[in-house]
């Protein structure tokens, strides 16, 4: 019965999103070009397909890799023109068995479960970071609500991820520069790679600044908190621009007593 109601909720939200796309269309990015013909890599990100063993997701890695390969093929080479909006789901489409997707791990109701099309949040994570790197406007982004694993070789601050679920939990960002950009996304074992290419270098660099990071207890639970800021450093000497991206505060699912800095419940 629970699964049935979940399916009905999903169908309802998917229908609402299709109606929204029809009634309120945006200038969606859809044109495809040969990414390698754009010579300058202005932003690049990568993440391992198989995580480290001390708390990492290791099940269904082959299936996840297959799913990511299919999704990358739909995104690779998409051109972003000035003012255009990137939508993960409008480009990738339904992640069904018929489309070739396999069961892999994804989060449902606070638990990791195998589901057809699972694992695509790894690609959404990289694309969100790339959007920040090119100073795109974040139109829609959904954060993971739990901290699942200890940090293992983390290269960005906690809370930089983006979760997706067709089609109503989307990642969307608007390109606001005056020059075209191209996204290149590929599975290159042992990594998932993504980059943004342009005709010329961008006039700025971006980094993500973490503030107020801590583990603490509340109502008997260990929670993790931080603030994420986007800092744009202009190459012409202009004062850097700082923008609050989000405030993360979520429940920790792994043993973390040694990480708690505030011993009493807050």
Image (tube, rainbow, N blue to C red):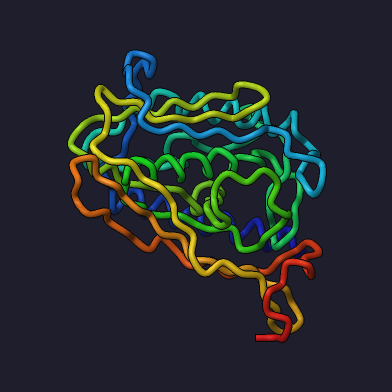
Image quarter for residue 192? Answer: top right
Image quarter for residue 189? Answer: top right
Which is more toward the observer, 161 or 26? 161
Q: Is residue 211 above or below residue 23?
A: below
Q: Is residue 45 above or below residue 136?
A: above
**Residue 157 percent location from the top left of the image:** 55, 53
**Residue 239 percent location from the top left of the image:** 22, 54
- Most extreme residue toward the front is 237
194 vs 31, left or right, is right
- The quarter of the rendered structure image containing the N terminus is bottom right
Which is more toward the observer, 149 or 201? 201
Identify the residue at horizontal 33%, vertical 60% (top origin). Answer: 243
Which is more toward the observer, 5 or 161? 161
Identify the residue at horizontal 44%, vertical 29% (top origin). Answer: 195
- The quarter of the rendered structure image containing the C terminus is bottom right
Which is more toward the observer, 24 or 226? 226
**Residue 158 percent location from the top left of the image:** 58, 56
**Residue 179 percent location from the top left of the image:** 20, 32
Identify the residue at horizontal 46%, vertical 45% (top origin). Answer: 128
Q: Is residue 198 above or below residue 164?
A: above
Identify the residue at horizontal 71%, vertical 66% (top origin). Answer: 252
61 vs 74, left or right, is right
């Amino acid at each position: 019965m629970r699964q049935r109601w979940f399916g009905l909720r999903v169908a309802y939200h998917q229908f609402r999103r299709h109606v929204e796309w029809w009634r309120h269309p945006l200038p969606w990015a859809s044109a495809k070009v040969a990414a390698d013909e754009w010579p300058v890599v202005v932003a690049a990100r990568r993440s391992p397909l198989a995580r480290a063993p001390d708390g990492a997701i290791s099940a269904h890695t082959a299936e996840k890799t297959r799913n990511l390969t299919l999704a990358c093929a739909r995104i690779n080479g998409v051109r972003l023109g000035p003012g255009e909006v990137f939508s993960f789901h409008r480009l990738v489409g339904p992640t069904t068995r018929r489309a070739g997707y396999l069961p892999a791990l994804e989060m449902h109701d606070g638990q990791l479960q195998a589901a057809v099309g699972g694992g695509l949040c790894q690609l959404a994570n990289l694309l969100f970071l790339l959007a920040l790197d090119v100073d795109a406007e974040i139109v829609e982004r959904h954060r993971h609500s739990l901290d699942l694993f200890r940090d293992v070789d983390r290269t960005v601050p906690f809370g930089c991820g983006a979760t997706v679920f067709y089609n109503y939990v989307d990642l969307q960002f608007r390109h606001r520069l005056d020059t075209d950009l191209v996204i290149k996304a590929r599975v290159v074992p042992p990594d998932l790679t993504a980059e943004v290419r342009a005709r010329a270098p961008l006039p700025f660099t971006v980094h993500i600044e973490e503030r107020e990071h801590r583990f603490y207890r509340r109502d008997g639970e260990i929670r993790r908190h931080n603030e994420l800021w986007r800092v744009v450093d202009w190459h012409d000497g202009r004062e850097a621009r700082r923008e609050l991206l989000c405030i993360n505060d979520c429940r920790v699912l792994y043993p973390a007593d040694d990480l708690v800095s505030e011993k009493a419940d807050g």
